[in-house]
Image (cartoon, grey):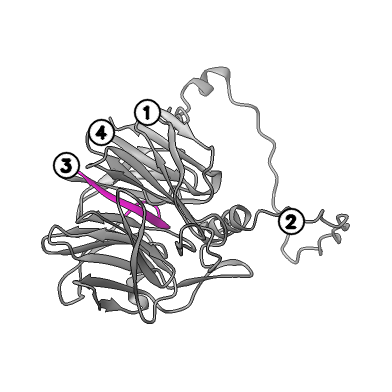
Amino acid sequence: MLHYRSLFSVGLLTATFGCASPPPPPAEQSPPPAPSSLPPANVEATQSPPADAKKSEAPKEEKAPAPTPVFRVTDGIATPESVLYDEANDRYLVSNINGKPDAADNNGYITEISPDGKVVKPKFIAGGVDKVKLDAPKGTGIAGGILYVSDISVVRKFDAKTGAPKGEIPVPGATFLNDLAIAKDGRVFVSDSGVKVGPSGFEPNGTDAVYVIDKGKVKAIAKGKELGEPNGLLALDNGVLVNTLGSNELYRLDDKGTRQDVTKLPGGGLDGLVQVGDRLLVTSWQTSSIYRGTLGGTFEVALPEQKGPADIGFDSKRKRVLVPRFLDNAVEVYDLK
């Protein structure tokens, strides 16, 4: 069985590179197995169990059926990483990497979708258009009328209404800025997952970190491999929640950068992270699931059969989960039960 990181990498490279593999060479005949040095096992003939015995067998556990989305959008969606619910303007903003997630190709874009599933603006913001620079947009957040977007090694700023560029904030030392979260006081948190795209997919490069941007100044809250390739973020009053791409851990970083309340989820390859009431929703690439639970408590599957679930959003008005299906070039929206 392949490790989930292998599966994730293969799917990612397929989605981002978009080219078919050459046909495999003809299969070679396998050599005959070497004779075993162990003595032959004693084989004893047995009769089939009576028909009544089959009735006593434990029933097989049934797999939960795939949920039905309220709607699914594929037109114009290309390697979607995040979906943000813009409450002030009642719309969904989708960040499209549109290529390799670490390539400075200036072809990333933001799509605007209405809550009824219509693509309002296929490229509300687009790299290479109207002096916009946008390579591989990932996490997004809005504060003070500004849309913040993490993009490899910088955080870019745009007017949330018009999409006009408003500058950028470089993050020195960052190589793979991923999720972005904004606190109530306007501070912007951003994670560096510390990975690069190599020949076999995502490979760690050791730049794991969580940063905070306060009044335009960048400061590292924590750095190091012990962060586990930090990905999804959620700003709290007493720190920031972090989940990990490289493991199945969810934890809180306090103001000193110390990991607190470390919680293990049933699956790994964690990505999206949002709060709904007193519960958290966390996506897992390893199990193709969206989990629901509490920090320090247990998590259970809320939405199964979610292949390549990236940075989810939550429509607080309609109680819906907004899911970017990274590998399928699609956005799906589900009612949360």
Residue at position x 51%, y 62% in the image: 101
Closer to the eye: label 2 or 1: 1
Q: Which residues are magenta?
A: 265-276
Contact (CB < 8 A) between labels 1 and 4? no
Give the CA separation, mark 2 to mark 4: 63 Å
Say which element carries label 3. Answer: loop
Contact (CB < 8 A) between labels 1 and 3? no
In the rendered image, the residue lying farthest to the bottom is 173
- Residue of label 3: 277
- Residue of label 2: 40
Q: Give the mark, 2 or 1, whose residue is nearer the N terminus.
A: 2
What residue type is disc 1 on? Asp
Residue 47 vs residue 259: left or right? right
What residue type is disc 2 on? Pro
Residue 246 vs residue 277: left or right? right
Residue at position x 88%, y 55% in the image: 26
Q: Give the mark, 1 or 3, whose residue is nearer the N terminus.
A: 1
Q: Give the mark, 1 or 4, whose residue is nearer the N terminus.
A: 1
What residue type is disc 4 on? Lys
Give the CA separation, mark 1 to mark 4: 14 Å
- Residue of label 1: 116
